[in-house]
């Protein structure tokens, strides 16, 4: 067996892609290793969302080149691969600045990895091979999903399943439409089959993934109709043994009535929604090309809350978007107060080369961005703590996923996506059990396991 080390950066979709890359390499006798030192192949599955992603990549690559040289002196070949969104956006630059990288492959082309590794250049090369020099960052006509192994080999208790990729929205700060390409949805039957397999492999929860997941419009082979996300959720909810269903990330514009209603009708659909608003200022939303305003967003949240009053809402925020004034920022704070979030992610705006906002004239000073970010995060942390506090004393079902870093504890997620720690044995990992919440920290809960006879654990 040969060994492959893979490091995933960024979003859940990259983690899903990494799992699929590993599965596609299994027929070539590769097995995963946690030790980069012993790897015959190293894959960095990169993310372009973080600031200075490319700089970070080049410094990682510098270290890996030293490792590659050391291994070469010991007679071992190491295939260095850069995958993901930085590969897509900076493929040529990587080849220029790090010519020792063997393969640069974009997120829509990684199903071709086995094919590349079977080329004579790889197969016949002796240990002195310098580089394969393959750059594959096209958006192929064929869907990678048709070429990936049909059988999912590994499954987590909470498993990701990509149903949709790419985006046609073109928010002015975002690289996704350029790195992942145009919006495309997988056929219904493929998704259902994969979900069934994940459940029969032990998944209790499935998190449907897509850059714009609620824009899903896959073809149902039965009648060649196009299904939206709501209809797909109803179908997946029928899978025997599936206890929890979630989806992320959504766009407010694609929260149709049918999808909102599904939150009141599908038991296994968890009462949690990540719905990024990005800013509470309509002027900034327009500059961001978000195509929704704060009223649209509020209407969706109100509808959801009237159908599912306990739903926990989460969001992303960007502060210091070019042109953002103190008044715009105040409007964001006021909007956060109005909506009330269970949790949220907030970031300082940083320019992504090639996006329209990157060349906007009115970039905001870093000191101002820092101040605004601190202020917003303090408010969001307070809201998260308040939301957690309200759950103290309640008994909630927790899906335990892994051992906790605290002694004798395991950890899992509440229906509202909160991290919950409880004293319990590892045998409960992979199961849903009732927990009485004793303590709320700002970012997690601590509770006591309840006897199985304590009733509902759905
Ligand atoms: S909708 Fe999301 S993925 Fe699409 S461009 Fe906007 S931020 Fe990027």
Image (tube, rainbow, N blue to C red):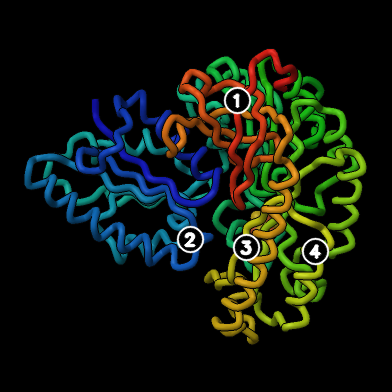
Left or right, 47 with respect to 7, comes to right
Answer whether residue 303 is visible to the viewer in this image. Answer: yes
Q: Do the residues labelled 3 and 1 touch (CB within 8 Å)?
A: no
Q: In which quarter of the image is residue 329?
A: bottom right
Disc 4 target residue: 337
| Residue 449 tag number | 1
Q: In which quarter of the image is ligand 1?
A: bottom right
Q: Which image quarter is the C terminus in?
A: top right
Q: Earlier in the sequence, mark 4 or mark 1?
A: 4
**Which residue is located at x 51 percent, y 29 percent?**
423
Can you tell which of label 3 and label 4 is closer to the viewer? Answer: 4
> SS at mark 2?
helix
Q: Which of marks 3 and 1 is nearer the N terminus?
A: 3
Q: Where is residue 42 in the image (x, y as percent from the top left)?
A: 30, 44
> SS at mark 3?
strand
Disc 3 target residue: 346
Q: Which of marks 3 and 4 is nearer the N terminus?
A: 4
**Separation of disc 4 and disc 1 at Cα?**
34 Å
Mark 3 Cβ and ligand 1 under 8 Å apart: no
């Amino acid at each position: 067996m040969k060994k492959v080390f893979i490091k995933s950066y960024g979003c859940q979709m990259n983690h899903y892609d990494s799992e699929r890359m590993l599965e596609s390499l299994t027929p070539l006798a590769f097995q995963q290793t946690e030790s980069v030192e012993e790897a015959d192949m190293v894959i960095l599955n990169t993310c372009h969302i973080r600031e200075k992603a490319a700089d970070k990549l080049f410094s990682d690559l510098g270290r890996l080149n030293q490792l590659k040289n050391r291994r070469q002196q010991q007679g071992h070949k190491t295939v260095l691969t850069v995958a993901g969104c930085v590969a897509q956006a900076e493929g040529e630059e990587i080849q220029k600045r790090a010519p020792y990288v063997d393969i640069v492959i974009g997120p829509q082309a990684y199903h071709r990895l086995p094919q590349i590794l079977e080329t004579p250049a790889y197969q016949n090369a002796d240990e002195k091979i310098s580089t394969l020099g393959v750059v594959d960052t096209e958006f192929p006509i064929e869907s990678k999903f048709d070429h990936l192994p049909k059988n999912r080999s590994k499954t987590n208790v909470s498993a990701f399943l990509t149903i949709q990729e790419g985006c046609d929205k073109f928010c002015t700060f975002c690289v996704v439409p350029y790195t992942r390409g145009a919006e495309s949805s997988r056929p219904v039957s493929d998704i259902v089959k994969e979900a069934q397999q994940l459940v029969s492999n032990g998944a209790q929860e499935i998190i449907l993934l897509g850059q714009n997941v609620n824009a899903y419009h896959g073809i149902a082979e039965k009648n060649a109709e196009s299904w939206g996300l709501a209809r797909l959720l109803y179908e997946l909810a029928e899978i025997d043994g599936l206890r929890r269903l979630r989806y992320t990330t959504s766009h407010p514009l694609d929260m149709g009535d049918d999808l909102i209603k599904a939150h009141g009708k599908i038991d296994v659909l968890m009462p949690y929604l990540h719905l990024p608003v990005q800013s509470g200022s309509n002027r900034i939303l327009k500059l961001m090309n978000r195509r929704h305003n704060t009223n649209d967003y509020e209407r969706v949240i109100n509808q959801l809350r009237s159908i599912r009053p306990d739903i926990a809402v989460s969001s992303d925020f960007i502060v210091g978007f070019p042109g953002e004034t103190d008044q715009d920022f105040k409007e964001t704070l006021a909007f956060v107060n109005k909506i009330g979030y269970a949790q949220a992610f907030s970031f300082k705006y940083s320019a992504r080369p090639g996006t329209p906002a990157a060349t906007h004239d009115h970039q905001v000073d870093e000191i101002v961005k820092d101040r605004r970010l601190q202020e917003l995060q303090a408010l969001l942390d307070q809201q998260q703590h308040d939301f957690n506090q309200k759950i103290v004393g309640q008994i909630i079902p927790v899906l335990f996923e892994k051992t906790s870093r605290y002694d004798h504890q395991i950890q899992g997620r509440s229906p509202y996506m909160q991290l919950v720690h409880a004293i319990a044995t590892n045998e409960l990992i992979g199961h849903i059990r009732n927990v009485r919440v004793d303590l709320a920290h700002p970012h997690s809960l601590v509770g006591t396991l309840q006897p199985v006879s304590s009733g509902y654990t759905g």
